[in-house]
Structure formats: C-alpha cells, structure tokens
Image (tube, helix red, strand yellow):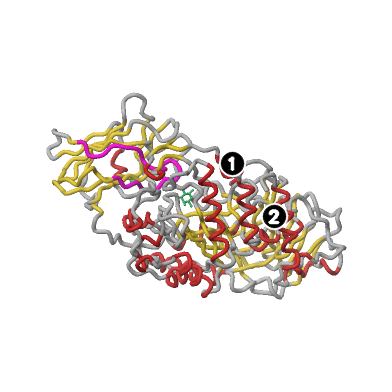
Amino acid sequence: MTDLSRRTLIASGLAATATATPALAATPATGPKPWGATPSARQLAWHARERYAFVHFSINTFTDREWGYGDESPKLFDPTDFSADQIVAAAKAGGMRGIVLTAKHHDGFCLWPTMLTEHCIRNSPYRKGKGDIVREMEQATRRAGLAFGLYLSPWDRNHPEYGRPAYIDYYRKQVVELCTRYGELFEFWFDGANGGDGYYGGAKETRTIDAPKYYDWPAIIALVHRHQPMACTFDPLGADIRWVGNEDGIAGDPCWPTMPDHSYVQAEGNSGVRGAPLWWPAETNTSIRPGWFYHPDEDARVKTPARLVRFFDESVARGTNMHLNLPPDRRGRIPDHDAAVLKSFGDAIAASFATDLAQGAVAGASATRGPAFAPARVLDGNRDTYWSTPDAVTTPTLTLDLPPGRSFDLIRLREYLPLGVRVTRFAIEAEVTGRWQRLATHECIGAQRIVRLPAPISARRVRLVILDAPACPAISEFALFRSVAPVPVAAPRSTDTAILSPRGWTIVAASAPGAEALLDGDGSTVWSQPAPAGTPASVTLDLGTAQRVAGFSLTPWRHPDKASAPPRGYRAETSLDGKTWAPAAEGEFQNIAYALATQRIPFTAPRSLRYLRLTFAATAVPAAKLAIADVGAFAR
Ligand code: FUL
Ligand code: CA
C-alpha cells in the first residue's frame, strides 16, 4: 500500500461510495464538465458538516499541562462527575454537528480499555478501571444525532519503542481498534506534532524522526479508509483535509480547497492554491479557551459569543469547516460558563440563518445553459441543483428581483462542488433606491461563501457578478439573511483559589522597559525587547508581602508579530528580602513557540517569598525580539 498516490486514494474514495450518493453522482449529461480538482464522496459529505467540536480530555486535564511527558501515572485520570451527555449537549447547543475526541494525546494515555498497553484507562480509578471514555462519548454523540470522530496522536511520549519500527506496528493496531470498535467515524485526526523529548518507557531522551518516512502516511490513511470509508483523515499529504495553518481559527480570504501535490507547507495552507491539483480543503480550528486542555486559571479567559461569531465568519464563511475545541474540566463536564457561551453563539447563528430572505424572489441571468440549469435553481434549497451557462460564458450575472421589504446583511453563495471550484472572483451588487452599488468583491466561493455587510440594506434587486472564471459557473445557492447578534454572557470569574491575583504586584527591576504589561492580565499587552544575546533578559517582581507560592506561570504573546518569539527556557529565583536569592526552577517551556499556551512551572518546592526573579536566556525560535504577555503565580 505504500506506493498509493494521493490521486489513487481519492479515486478509490469516489469509487467506493459512488452508489451511496446517487443525487450527487447523477450530473445530467448536458451539464458542464468538471473544472480542476474535485472532492471525493467523503470530502463532499465533510463539507456539508460545517461545524463540529474538538474535545481535549485526558491526563493533562488533571496535571494542568498542555503536553504530558508520558511518565504520568494512569491513576491521575479521575473525573469526579463525568457526563458524556452534558459535553455533547453543550456542543450541540453551539450548533456543532460532530465531536472529535482525543483518544490518545502526546503523553500516550489511552481513553479506551485497550490491551495493547498498560498506559490506559484500565489502570485508572475511573469506574474502577472498567470505564471506556471513547465508548461513552461515542454513544452520547450518536444519541444526540451527531457524528463521531477521533484524534490519535502519532507522537507517543510514553511508548518505549517510539521512533523505532515496533511503535508503528503498535500505532497501526491502535488505529484498527478505534476504527472497528466505535461505529462509523466521520473524521480521523493525526497530529502534526511529532518527535522530541519524552519518557519513552523510562529512557527519558529526545527522539527525532523523519515523519513522512517513519509513519508512511499513505499506508496509515489507507488503513483508516479500509475500515472507515467515509472518515476524512486530517493533515499529512494524502489525507482528505488539511490544517488551516494557525490555531487561532482564521482561514485565509480566499481559502481555496485545492493544494499542490507536495507535503504540507504552512504558508500555502492558510489560503490554499488556486487551480492546484489536489482537493485538500482546510479545517479551521481553535479552542474556546487559550489552551486545548482545561486549566482552572483560564476560567476567566473563555472566548465570548461575539468572538465565536467572528470565528464563524473567518472559517465557515470562507468555505472551510469550523473545529471548535471544548475542554471538559476535572469533573468531566464542560464548565457552565463555556456552555452558556456556546448556547448564546449557537442560538445567534441558528436565528441568523433561519429564514432565507431570497425566497419568493424572481431569479434571472444574463445567460442560461438550459431549463435544467435555470437561475431559479439557486433558490430551491437543493445543493445538487445549480444555475449554469453555456461553456463559453464564464463571466455572467445572476439577478434576484426581491419581494418588497427584504432587509438583509448576510449573503450566502455556494458552488456545486462536484464540478470543482469554478469562480475565481465575483462581486455582489444591490439596487437601492434606483441605483446599483457594489457591496463586496471576493475571490473564491467554493463550498460556501458568506458575505457579511456592515449594516442591513433593503434592496429591490441584488446580483452576483462573476468577474473572473476559467469555466462557466455552477452556482447551487444564492441566499440572503438578516443577522441576529448573540446575547452577551456575563464575564466569567476564575474559580481557582490557587491562582494568586497580581493586583498590587510591582516590577522592581527589568532588562527592558514596559514590564508592567506582564501584570495586567491582558494577553494582548506585551513586554518586548531585543532577543537576548549573551546577557539574558530578566524581570524581578515584588508581590508586596511574603506569600506562599508553589510556582509561576507565563503567558506568551498569542499573536506575535513576525519579529517576536517567546522565551525558550527560564530560571526562577525567589527571595524574602530582595537580597538573598534561592533557586526555584530551571528548564525549558514545553511547545511554547507552537502552542503559545500559558505555561505553569512548579517550583522544586513551595516556599514563602516576596520577590520573584525570572531570567530568560534565549528565544524559543530564532527571532529579533523576545516578547511575553503575562506572568503569574499559583499557591498550590
Ligand atoms: C497540536 C497539539 O500539539 C496540541 O496539543 C493540540 O492537540 C492541537 C489540536 O494540535 O498539534
Ligand atoms: Ca499583558
């Protein structure tokens, strides 16, 4: 299977499922020929999913980490009040149509009772070792009528054989267990973070791998598809869907679903490449909180409903799927505040798109291919019918003559995807009090393009003007909506009494000015300075009074400019009088440049201190400047 090319994989996906979706396959003979790359049947089904949740839940939930080292005892996995139904209900209230659960994260702990390793839920206190979180989540997901998918980290910091052939054998066996025990999966997520230091059965060393060669992705992808023909695989070349290139929930504008036939390049992932040969559409992911896993000190940093609407506009509205992470807490539930935010967001989107205001309009076009492709096909609510023109007419116009009193601020367009992405550039124009005005111009329609206007308009007529296209159009939808803003949810409060409030703390010394930004609890204000070369950067905090402190936290700048990077490592020293200093911690931050998550560093032992000095010798990646957003401390 190793020589399977990307093309053969797509072709086999199409062949295997052609009969399952007759409506999509039955393009009339007189329809236009496809242009460029086209989606497989499983990709087509995936495009229609639009929004689904990610659920990061594992050992890290209990150790307060983002990446476990792999030496954690399975006994730490002990949710006090786990409810798969509550998690799924919260996701569903947010309009999520599926759930992707972390069956195993980088630390190697398995949430299902596998016999392939002892590092799994069988050895945890959860349901006295008889539990199966994957099963409970799968069943709750199906009860709620949602689709189920799984994340299985290829990097395994627990497994003794990681980096060697025996581990690949183990990983493939895990894939087979997950693909055969839990019913139909809609997605299977491989994680791009591979290799590095870890426990590795006690070896405690760094293992580097040549990922494409080591994993042999085509073979692993084929294995998933053998058992799960409709599961879209995530990310490596040959997979069905690609990473959007950031973890902030922002797709490019445009975001083409096509990519060149070479390994993933981050710079290409965000916008895709127009006309490239592979159908490899983007999934846009982010977390409702700063971290992927639950951390009590992020209880006050949950995204707002309005921020989630922006995420929708920057993902779904650009034709990609929205993958929103919802981390359960130590009870094993979505925190109440997060659930309230989801409901507000979900209700707003549902209300916004409840009524298509283009219904009742009369559709006309500058050209039409024939009765089966009439302009009215964009209004029939059927994704499988479309308006088209003769082959030679590539820049036509379609006009909707609206019933009176229609006021809208959202315009949704869809192309008939089985014929490829045909429109390169288009404009939306409206006739308001007798004059046509251009409302927006964009590149790419694809699976869908939702244009949000700054304010609602009441138009007599509205039209789609195709400005540039290599082939005649196939537009399956032209719909109009009036947006409903989400109901605000009161600001959350941190429930973690271990977090020490930085109120009253001061900066007593710093290697560069502006260090007050570290204490304002605002992740967008940063302390910045030239990257340390020789002399380390340092900052000394005065907590005002002597306090018992167990460790410090550091939040990197989440949206660093191109010149800036977070620190690679740290040295922490503490003092009661500001004169005599004792070492407290020294090491490297985990995954800081990539995940940009708050880091919590325990001291070698809790102690009483008034002064805290932090020293940073280098940036995590080569950069001109070192930047840090916030520093904090915790008591336990
Ligand atoms: C990354 C991982 O390293 C993070 O922990 C998280 O799982 C994210 C979704 O993918 O590659
Ligand atoms: Ca700040």
**Residue interval drawn in magenta:** 583-601
Give residue 474's position: percent from left, percent from top: 77, 60
**Disc 2 marks which residue?**
427
Q: Residue at x 45, y 66 (%)?
A: 342
Give residue 340's position: percent from left, percent from top: 41, 69
Residue 321 falls within the magenta-colored stretch: no
- Label placed on residue 10: none
Depth check, mark 1 against mark 2: the one in front is 1
Is 435 placed left or right of 328 in the picture? right
Q: Residues within 10 Å of mark 2 (few under 14, many from 20)?
A: some
Q: Residues within 10 Å of mark 1 (few under 14, many from 20)?
A: few
Amino acid under disc 1: Pro
Q: Is residue 74 above or below residue 533?
A: below
Q: Is residue 128 above or below residue 624?
A: below
**Disc 1 marks which residue?**
212
The answer to whether any part of residue 111 appears in the image is yes
Amino acid under disc 2: Ala
